[in-house]
Image (cartoon, rainbow, N blue to C red):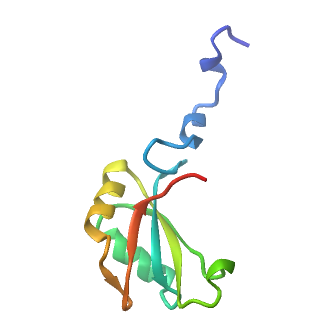
Amino acid sequence: MSENPKFDEKEDDHMERPSSIGIKRRLGFAIFIDNVSKRIHYETLKEAFQAYGCVFDVYIAYKSLKRKDKPTTFSFVRFGTEIEARSVVERSNGRLMDGKQIRVFIAKRR
């Protein structure tokens, strides 16, 4: 073991820590999208947000217990860079998607 603990960390350990603007995972920055129609499909959401940058993955909470009786849910979309994530928030917050006005924010760790 070296005297400097920085050199003992795995090469990609820093990628697992949360960033100051949102959830930074191994491959990017997540945005939170609220008021998403439960009828929307993963591919539809992915295609809609690819216009803003490289989408790494999409998660739609179809079975949220808090929203089981509501027609809307929430989702997370992960982008490659902070710039892309911030651009999405600025450009897509309030837009209509499948008849619902979505709200878009930088994802925060709980």
Residue found 61% across the figure and 18% down from its top: 7
* Residue at 45% in and 41% down: 20
Q: Is residue 57 left or right of residue 51?
A: right
Q: Against 23, is 11 above or below?
A: above
Position of the N terminus, as image quadrant, is top right
Q: Nearer the viewer, residue 74 or 58?
A: 74
Query: Considering only vertical position in the picture, is 7 above or below 65?
Result: above
Percent position of residue 58, x then y: 51, 69
| Residue 31 x/y as whole percent | 44, 61
Residue 35 visible in image: yes
Please name the residue shown 51% across and 54% down the image.
Answer: 108
* 20 displayed left or right of 48: right
Judged left or right of residue 9, residue 40 is: left
View extreme (left): residue: 91
Confirm whether residue 64 shows in the render.
Answer: no
Residue 28 drawn at (x, y percent): 46, 51
Number of marks in the rendered image: 0
Q: Residue at x 42, y 83 (%)?
A: 44
Query: Residue 47's spot in the image, x, y percent?
Result: 37, 77
User: Is residue 55 rendered to the left or right of residue 66?
Assistant: left
Along the viewing direction, whichever of 108 and 80 lies nearer the viewer: 108
Residue at the far right in the pictured view: 1
